[in-house]
Image (cartoon, grey):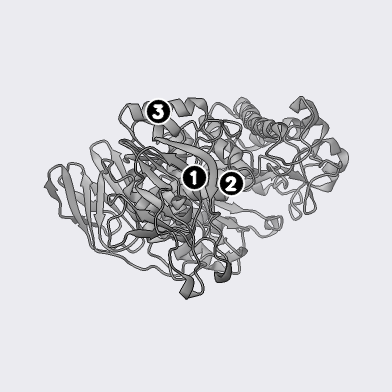
Amino acid sequence: MKPWYRRTLRWAQTNLTEKDPARYDADWWREQWRRTRVQGVIVNAGGIVAYYPSKFELHHRAEYLGDRDLYGEIVEAARAEGLTVLARMDSNRAHQPLYDAYPDWFAIDADGNPYRAGPLYVACVSGPYYKDFLTGILEEIIERSTPDGITDNSWSGLGRDSICYCPNCRDSFGQELPAAVDWEDPVYKQWIRWSYDQRLAVWDLNNEVTRRAGGADCLWIGMNGGEVVAQSKRLRDDAAICERARIFLLDSQWRHEESGFQANADSGKRLHGMLGTETLIPESTAMYDAGVPTFRLGSKPAPEARMWAIEGWAGGIQPWWHHIGSVHDDRRQYATAQPLFEWHEQHEEFLVDRDPVATVGLLWSQRSVDFHGKNHPETVSQLPYRGWTDALIRARIPYLPTNVVDRRFDVLVVPNVGVLTDEQVAQLAGYVQAGGKLVVTGESGLYDEWGIRRGDWALGELVGVRHTGKRLGDGTVTDWENYDSHSYLRIEDRSVFDGDTDVLPFGGQLELVEAAGKPALTWIPPFPIYPPEKSWMEEPRTDTPALVRGERTAYLAADLDRLYAKYHHPDHGKVLANLVRHATIPLRVDGAGLLDCQLYRQGDRHVLHLVNLDQGGAWRGRLEEFTPAGPFTVRVRASGHRARLLVSGRDAEVQQQDGWITVEVDRITDHEVVVLE
């Protein structure tokens, strides 16, 4: 039998409040577990608030707990249902009495004042609170209830913008702590790497404690976010955590408007790239009204929650419903999970243990997010990456995120990854020499592993250009009277953009480079946008390269990837997609609409997950209803004689020709899963 962390696919969490011991309806929630077909539950145990009578006097009990063991009662009910149980902690903060007794356990700023979050005090990850007090609580929880494992919501302490100057940090760091957040200070950079190590030490210590107390499979699992920038700001080393994780608990509860539903599938693919395809990634999906603004006790519209979950499934994520509190006046949230989880149970064999099929890789680097992105990681690092993901989704070209130079890809894209180590530079050269196609954008490789600008561009010879160290334009869009971004790109190579135009809108930043050959795109300098009488090209053509193409390389000096993430101008997306179309793309989907297409292989079977992203595009805010799309003609480079449409619940006619299978999909409301056998 598989261990619990390999077999528990559907999860439930009723996140208890301090009032819940007086009002928790055990029978109702037990029936909700059954209705939603869950296999595991996450139950509040201790940390900031204890839901059992802890032997530790300063372990704050829930206000309405008294001598009741609500945590233990819920665990007993879950065991009776045959469910996996994780004890939930939220442990990086504490109440006044604990702080008063042990002030040296808590983080302090440069002036010696404690860091606070409302009325609570933030503990230091380097001190006895984590190393002694919390480990004792872990042992107590295991001794009382033998959970399958323990998870923690806010396990990593302060973020990178808050330096702790407590004696524990001073002693552990081994030198004078940085005076302030300063990305030009070598000591601050060292503090960043040291801080990552402190969080990994928490992970390792807690797992040593739980396995010693509860057995080899009694895991401690810190919850983590889905986007690399968010992880960086919390000082969580994604790659190192994934090396340790037997299951990855993903606390990424809702869609952010700037990234869209598709970001959830990308997170799943990115994490599976480090974890492997067999490791499960349950994701906490808010049934409450999470977003901007958030209403903890309101109900999120069912289509909004459903689309976020479905995109997660498309990327290899498993479902986990999440409510705040056990009693709600807005009871609409209770109905959202059941149809989702029932469908997942019925078709789970097609949603796990599958290998992604893609020939395009997108390189990402958490180190570059830190030491290149610095104070602006979203703009510098995340937007160029997201521009590529959105462009490839729009073009229906399967891709995979990768944090290593992987030769299995026909094309590898390096989207403004400014920090590349010498080893990575050598690996990229070897990748091209072995026949791979390389697309490099922006400042990729201009900086060493500490974010220090190199004297010679490490990738210059490889892509056939020389970087001058200068930049044109700043990509700022202001009012029409002072519009410095009214620039264009001239098409010199029709394979880049085939259409009835000689120029493309630009309006962004351009890295100034020199190229030996003729560029594929050249820069047209800005000219007035207003008044219209002045809106004509004073300099209609230059030799300034915006895109340089070699036999197996392309260098994009124009930040079209960043611009596409921000504005989604169709011309920019088409240029990006065209730069990878020479790959052997295993999928083609024809038909009007925006689909996220994820292709997988299970032995001789192919599974194609199609998610309809044409939802609510004219409105910001929560998704209220679905907009069906179709019909679509799907072609997959595969063999087989049968096609099943799992959402429609029917078989589809299969046509085979020249190594391709063709299937017609008439209509997609939210998603469809095509199984080819």
Question: Mark 1 and mark 3: span between their CA atoms?
Answer: 22 Å
- Residue 235 drawn at (x, y percent): 64, 39
- Residue 669 drawn at (x, y percent): 33, 64
Is residue 318 something that shows in the picture? Answer: no
Quadrant in the picture for residue 426? top left
- Compared with 280, 503 (above or below) is below
Classify mark 2: helix, strand or loop: helix
Identify the residue shown where x is 64% and y is 42%.
Answer: 234
Residue located beneath label 3 in the image = 429
Mark positioned earlier in the residue sequence (3 or 2): 2
Residue located beneath label 1 in the image = 512
Question: Mark 3 and mark 2: span between their CA atoms?
Answer: 26 Å
Identify the residue shown where x is 68% and y is 43%.
Answer: 159
The answer to whether marks 3 and 2 mark residues whose Cβ atoms lie closer than 8 Å is no
- Compared with 375, 526 (above or below) is below
Q: For the residue marked with disc 3, what is the amino acid? A: Ala
Along the line of sight, which residue is nearer the eye, 351 or 158? 158
Question: Mark 2 and mark 1: span between their CA atoms?
Answer: 22 Å
Residue located beneath label 2 in the image = 377
Classify mark 1: helix, strand or loop: strand
